[in-house]
Amino acid sequence: MNNKKKDFIRGLYEIGAVKFGSFTLKSGLESPFYLDLRKVISYPKLHAFMCEMLIEKAAELSFDIVMGIPYTALPSAASIAEKLEKPLLMLRKEKKAYGAGGIIVGDQELKGRCLIVDDLITTGSSKFETADSLRAEGFEASDILVVVDRSAGAEAELKARGLELYSLISLDEIVDLLCADGSLKIEKVEEIRAFTSGLSAVVPAEAGNKVEANPLTLKLLEVMKRKETNLILSLDTEDAGEFFSILEASADKIAMVKTHIDIIKDFTPDFTRRLVKLAGEKDFLIFEDRKFADIGNTVKHQFYGGIYNIADWADCVTSHLIAGEGTVKGLFPNGANPDRPQAAFLLARMSSKGNLITEDYSRRVIDAGRGSSSIVSGYIGHGSDVDDIKKFRAMIPEGQLLLMPGVKLERGSDKLGQQYLTAEEAIAGGADCIIVGRGIIEAENPAETAEIYRQRAWTVYENK
Ligand code: S5P
C-alpha cells in the first residue's frame, strides 16, 4: 500500500468516517463497521487530498462526461470535472418513481461516455440501477470510480454487466492498515471479513431483505392457493344492491374484495354484516381501501369508530405514510392481534399520472413497512412496464406482498389520469395480486370478465 493511501485511511479514521462496533444498516442487517464519507467535505485538507487521488485515477481513464451521484460524491465529481476540463452532470436524487421527468441535472443535451463517480460500492446493486437508467437515457456507462470499495466481490458481477470498477481504497486495506496500527483488534477483523463475505454481490443491501410473513399475509396466500386466484375485485359502486349482485356472482373468482365503504350511498350496518357473512361463505377477504393518511390518534378514530367501524369487518386496509409511521401505529396501537389477523398495505407507488411520489419516498415507505412487518402485509405499487415493476419489486422484502391496481386487459388510461397495465405485465413484473375495478364492474358480464382476469393473472403467477 502506498503512503498516500495510508495517509488517507488514517485521515478517515481520525475524523470518524470509519467506525467499528455494531451498527444497524437500513436493510436491517447488523454491521461490524460503518463508513460515513459524508463527513469528509467538512475537512478541507482531507477532502482536497481525496479529490487529488480521484483526479489522478480519473486522468488515466477515457470518458466525455463526469456523472456525479448524489450526495456524498458530488463535490469530488465537481472537482474532477473542473480539473480535467470535462463537463459535469449529476444524477437527480429525487427523481420521479417512474414515468416522464428528467433524471439528469446539467445540460440535458449532453450525451457520451460517462465516468460515474460515487462514494462507495457495497454489493453493486445500486450501480447496476444507475448504469441502467443512464443507458436508458442514451449515455454510455461503463466506468465507475468510487472512493471506497467495501464490496464482497462486486467487481466480477459489474464486469458481467459491462461495468469497470475503479476505487481509491478497499475495505480490506482499511482493515489491514488499522489493524497494523493497533487501532483495530484482530477479533474484530475476523468479524468484518465474515460479514463482508456473507454479502452477496447479486442480492443487494436487500441481502437481508426478508421478513416473516404475518398472519394476515399467510391467510391471504392460503385463500389464493385454495381458490387459485390472485384477483382482488375493486367493487367501486355506490349502490349496495349492485355491489352485492356483482360480488355474489364473482365471489368464486376472487381472493379479496376491495371496498371504498364511504361511497356506498345507502350504507347501513347491515351492509357490512352481509359482507362479512358472504366473505365467510365464499372464502374471500375484505380489503377496505380507506387510504389512511392522518396522525396516529386521528386514524385510530377513523379505523375503530364512526359509522363505518372499519376495524370490525375489514381484514386489511390501505394506508399512506406521508404523515409518518404514527399512522400505521395508530391503526394497530397494540401491534398484531394473534386472535384476529389484520394488517395494512402501504401505498409505496401510485398508478395515477403526475402523482408526487418519488423513488426516495417509495424506498422509505418500504423501509418503514419492513420494520413493522407484523402489521404491514405489503405495498400497493405500480410501474411503467415489466422491468420497472421488477426493479420496484426487488426493494420489497420476501414475506411481504405487492398488490397492483391500475390493471385492465389492455394498457390505457382514463380521463382523470388513471394508468393501466395489463394483468400479465403486473404479475410478470412481480405483483402478487392484481386489483381490478372498472375492467370488471363495467363489463357486460362482470363474473365472466372476472374469470378472464383470474385466469390471465393466475397463469403467469403459477408459471413463475
Ligand atoms: O395507486 C393506486 C392505488 C389504489 S388503491 N391506484 C388505484 O387506482 N387504487 C385503487 O384501485 C383506486 O382507488 C380504485 O379503487 C382501484 C382502481 O380502480 P379501476 O377502476 O381504475 O380499476
Image (cartoon, rainbow, N blue to C red):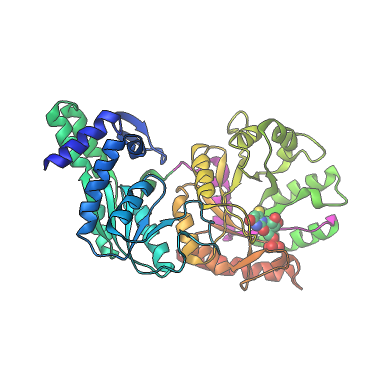
Q: Is residue 26 magenta?
A: no
Foreground of the two, 210 or 451: 210
Q: Position of residue 15 (x, y in %)?
A: 29, 30
Q: Position of residue 17 (x, y in %)?
A: 30, 34
Looking at the image, the residue that sits furthest to the right is: 266
Start-end of magenta stretch: 211-240
Foreground of the two, 280 or 15: 15
Residue at left offset 25%, top offset 31%:
13
Is residue 330 in sight in this rendering? yes
Foreground of the two, 105 or 254: 105
**How many marks overall?**
0
Quadrant placement of the N terminus: top left
User: In the picture provided, is 59 more to the left or to the right than 72?
Assistant: left
Q: Position of residue 443 (x, y in %)?
A: 74, 71
Quadrant placement of the C terminus: bottom left
Residue at left offset 22%, top offset 41%:
171
Where residue 10 sits, quadrant-wise, is top left
Q: Position of residue 49 (x, y in %)?
A: 24, 41
Is residue 152 in sight in this rendering? no
Residue at left offset 76%, top offset 73%:
444
Q: Is residue 229 magenta?
A: yes
User: In the picture provided, is 236 more to the left or to the right than 60?
Assistant: right
User: In the picture provided, is 343 more to the left or to the right than 59?
Assistant: right
Above or below, 177 against 103 in this view is above
The image quadrant in which ligand 1 is located: bottom right
Above or below, 383 against 204 in this view is below
